[in-house]
Amino acid sequence: MHVLHSGLLRQLQKQELAPKKACQRVLLLISLLTTFGVAQTLTVFAASSLTEAFSDLAAAFETDNPGVTVLLNIAGSSTLRTQIEQGAPADVFASANVFHMNALVEADLVTDVQLFAQNRLVVISQPDAGLQTLADLAREDVRLVVAAPYVPAGSYTREMLERLASHDSQALDGQALDSQALDGQALVDAIFKNVVSEELNVRQVVSKVQLGEADAGVVYQSDVRVFTDLAVIPIADAVNVTATYPIAVVRGANEGVARAFIDFVLAADGQQVLASYGFLPISD
Amino acid sequence: MPTLWLLASFLALFIALPSVLLLSWALRPGFVETLLSEASLQALRVSLVTTSISLLVIITLGTPLAYVLARKRNVWTRFLGLWLDVPLVLPPVVAGVGLLLALGRRGVLGGWLEPLSLAFSPTAVILAQVFVASPLYVRSLKAGFASVHDDLEASATTLGASPWQVFWHVTLPLARPALVEGSLLAWARAAGEFGATLVFAGNLAGRTRTLPLAIYTTLERDLDSALHLAAVQTLLAFVFLGVVKWLSAAKRLQKK
């Protein structure tokens, strides 16, 4: 901008343009700069599990759109929803579940909701905790950390455990329950008893396990791509749940840039970034 | 003069307004229901039990420490005094991480403490509270001990009192106002403890979820209830500080 400006000045001096014409040129310059969005900021509120993927997406979007600065506000989806309800200045909201997004749609605070990614749950544990299967989480000495019920990861975890409660050993591909194991409901009751903390976003679950304070935690498979030093216990498809991530334009947003960012996330390149972190594409 | 009043009122209003608004939530409909709900009674119970035990620990261990710091004044105790004030200005999250490094399962002392299974226990909540709140008690009581003249203790000794008798019957009673003030401040600080608890002790209803953690957790789903609980917390803070003010005013009257 500075270069353009001094160039224009020099031209003005050299050609000694009539004041009226000079004025027109300056106006043209100003309108050009505004159209191309010099120093525009886009504030994106994104769920904790999206931390790395959205950092990459934001950086790529900034490269493609010079002059646009993307500000990321990362927290649990429930926290972000509360912030938007309280009037936080967001342009885009990416939630880890549909529930919090729908609440904002009903309050007419967001518009143009689209689904952009899916995720699955896994159990992470300290490699030396000796946990192999989902059923091991019911062992008496296990300290299990989950996300709070209102946090998407927490509601998916409860949904998954409810499904586990209604399943018998066969349905789990033989991976979770052995012959002496408890029936589903008793198993799940025992697992719930081992919950020592309810965290307010999924990354706090990860950090409690990483620190070794907790033996195990239920998180997303995408989190495991980032934190590779943890043992991963897969959850059988029969009981696992699919997390669905919606994204939307926040009312009162910088709409053009907000829509451009959402299109970017949904386009092939954006989807590639998400896939590289273990997110799944939206299946129809 | 009016200009001075105007200027002075800016910061005063800024500081007073939020707590006035928080307190006003105690008058809103639904306050009693929230207060009597299972979740808030649980949180109040956890807060009451943990802060009471914390206070006992702080008084038991903080009193001798304050005495040593007040009576043995040399380079080392001054340095130690500075060191002990650090938790006062440490961000709570940092305090929590520091506690993890020391007492966490992988911490320096973690191996020895493992049989106590501290992680995610109410004991961990108490440790977090003691860590952040005891400096207030020690500071206050240290000043209290320092204001007791040496010659009073010396004359008690010449009259045949043992060092213990001097401490119990002369020094401690004279430092009592400082002890009470320090206790109340430490209790208030412990009751407001949040970050270190969240990091070090976790967040589980009925076990480690104190009132501040309950407010934080409720904020996620129910703003009104969270604000009702916040009003309770603000009210408690006012009561603590009010008693401290009242006691020091009473002390001043006594001196006159």
Image (cartoon, rainbow, N blue to C red):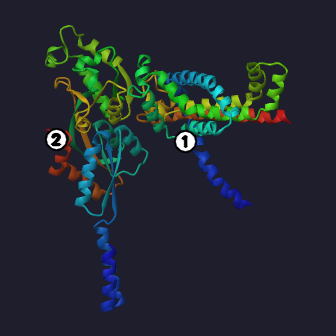
Whether residue A226 appears in this view of the structure is yes
Q: How many marks?
A: 2
The one nearer the camera, A236 or B57, is: B57
Q: Quadrant of residue A161?
A: top left
Whether residue A112 appears in this view of the structure is no
Location of the C terminus of chain B (image quadrant): top right
Residue at image position (63%, 54%) is B10
Q: Position of residue B40 (x, y in %)?
A: 50, 25
Amino acid under label 2? Pro
Residue at image position (73%, 34%) is B146
Q: Secondary structure at mark 1?
A: helix
The one nearer the camera, A146 or B102, is: B102
Residue at image position (55%, 27%) is B32
For disc 1, the marked residue is B89
Q: Chain of mark 1?
A: B
Q: Position of residue B184 (x, y in %)?
A: 65, 30
Determine crowd level at label 2: few under 14, some 14-19, many 20+ residues with C-alpha closer than 10 A. Answer: some
Measure the C-alpha gap from mark 2 to mark 1.
Answer: 47 Å
Q: Position of residue B50 (x, y in %)?
A: 54, 23
Q: Quadrant of residue A4?
A: bottom left
Location of the N terminus of chain B (image quadrant): bottom right
Question: Is B231 placed above or below A195 here?
Answer: below
Question: Is B205 placed above or below A183 here?
Answer: below
For residue A67, the mark is none
Amino acid under label 1? Val
Q: Are marks 2 and 1 on the same chain?
A: no
From the viewer's perspective, is the residue at label 2 or at label 1 nearer?
1
For residue A281, the mark is 2
